[in-house]
Image: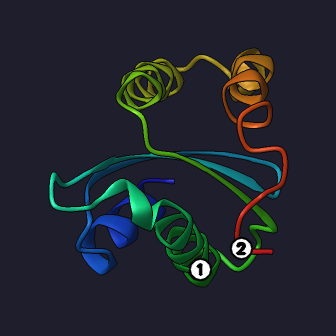
Amino acid sequence: AEKIADAIVKDIDAVKDARVIISDKMAYVSVSITETAGSDTSKDLKEEIGKVVKKTDTAIEDVYVMEDADTFTRMKEIGDDIADGKPVSGFLKELENMFVRVTPTPTAK
């Protein structure tokens, strides 16, 4: 997940920071975008992020991307909890609620 987040930040100028959580063959991605990245680029940006994720980890089939500040903050907290040893499975329902309801179909199919 960290390798993917680093690749997103490195490869996409509009992204200043990224958080990634992987579950099975799904990647949940939350990004903090630069001020110069306008909201009109949202769909293109999500597709570009999806391509970077799948290029970095070919086992990923579905990529869900969010770019709002609240989700980014929560993803950072979840990532910290996982790094502290809490299982990803304990956060799956919350991740689904954050991403799937807002983005019903994954990007970069």
Q: Amino acid at mark 1?
A: Lys
Q: Residue at the location (71% across, 80% down)?
A: 58
Query: Badge 1, how many Cα within 10 Å: few under 14, some, many 20+?
Result: some
Q: Is residue 80 left or right of residue 88?
A: left
State the image coordinates of residue 48 (x, y, percent, origin top left): 51, 77
Q: Are discs 2 and 1 less than 8 Å apart at CB?
A: yes
Residue 3 in view here: no
Residue 13, position in %: x, y? 23, 73
In space, the residues marked 2 and 1 are separated at their CA atoms by: 6 Å
Label 1: which secondary element: helix
Residue 69: x and y in percent read 35, 29
Which residue type carries mark 2?
Ala
| Viewport quadrant of the C terminus | bottom right
Q: What residue sits right under mark 1 in the picture? A: 51
Is residue 37 depicted above or below 27 in this figure? below
Q: Earlier in the sequence, mark 2 or mark 1?
A: 1
Compared across the picture, whether 79 is left or right of 102 comes to: left
Q: Which residue is mark 2?
A: 108
Picture disc at residue 41? none
Query: Which residue is situated farthest in the left direction here?
Result: 35
Q: Nearer the viewer, residue 35 or 65?
A: 35
Residue 41, x across and y down, in percent: 42, 67
